[in-house]
Amino acid sequence: MDSLTTTGPQQRQLAAELSAAMTAIHSRGWCDGTGGNFSCVLQRSPLKLLMAPSGVHKGCVGPEDLIVVDGNAAVVRGRGRASAETLLHLAIVIETGAGAVLHTHSQAGTLLSQQVAPRPGVAGQLRLRDLEMLKGLEGITSHTCAVNVPVLANDQDLRRLSAEAIPHLGTAPHGLLIAGHGLYAWGASLAIARRHLEIHEFLLEQSWRQLLMTALKH
């Protein structure tokens, strides 16, 4: 299939922005090695996503390395294969209207999601409250509030996992956790999705450190 070097200026610009975002996210230690996956909506009808291919080091994916997948998670442009987790990206985009979905494997997200310990078919939640940084999430205007981040049990059957996620997406605070796996964050654009990702990762890190402080006191 053709690479993205033969596409128009708008798609090349989006590819450059997504590549730069992945490099920055990797530099924060949130997607080491081949961990994580990242997508942006290229068009809505028919739905097409611009994504990083599966199994590559996310810190050095150039714009020309990205792939385009359709609404069935099939690669229609670029070289490489789509991650199985493309199905969850598609579910989030369809259900929330997101323009970008960013998935990380940070230490904080992985550890805290395990603390919640959801069971297959029964989601848990991580409650975040009374923190100024919550105001970085779209729709929140005061620190005097609480959000519940859905936490789903991990499942290698991504079709089943995506179906389990759908009922929670409408009320999720632009993010959800997969236990022992990591965070999915999204937004109307790549810039907003990246902001939501950074806010969630800050809140997760703060929660993890709070647990450590509490343990030390005892």
Image: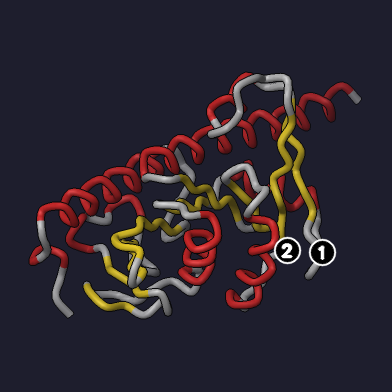
Q: Residue furthest front?
A: 45
**Image point 77% across, 48% down: which residue?**
125
Q: Position of residue 71 (x, y in %)?
A: 40, 74
| Residue that numbered label 1 is attached to | 122
Q: Nearer the viewer, residue 149 or 116?
A: 149
Which quarter of the rendering shows the C terminus?
A: top right
Q: Is residue 42 left or right of residue 196?
A: left
**Image point 42% across, 79% down: which residue?**
72
Q: Position of residue 159 (x, y in %)?
A: 59, 77
Judge whether 96 appears above or below 164 on screen. Answer: above
Mark 2 crowdedness (10 Å alpha carbons): few <14, some 14-19, many ≥20: many
**What amino acid is labelled 1 in the image?**
Val
Q: Is residue 29 left or right of residue 124?
A: left
Say what secondary structure mark 1 lies in: loop
**Image point 46% across, 69% down: which residue?**
86
Q: Are marks 1 and 2 in contact (CB under 8 Å)?
A: yes
The numbered mark at residue 153 is: 2
Q: CA distance from mark 1 to mark 2?
A: 8 Å
Q: Nearer the viewer, residue 72 or 119?
A: 72
Mark 1 crowdedness (10 Å alpha carbons): few <14, some 14-19, many ≥20: few
Q: Earlier in the sequence, mark 1 or mark 2?
A: 1
Q: Nearer the viewer, residue 145 or 210?
A: 145
The numbered mark at residue 211 is: none
**What amino acid is labelled 2 in the image?**
Ala
Judge whether 38 appears above or below 22 on screen. Answer: below
Which quarter of the rendering shows the N terminus?
A: bottom left
Say what secondary structure mark 2 lies in: loop
Q: Position of residue 81 (x, y in %)?
A: 34, 76
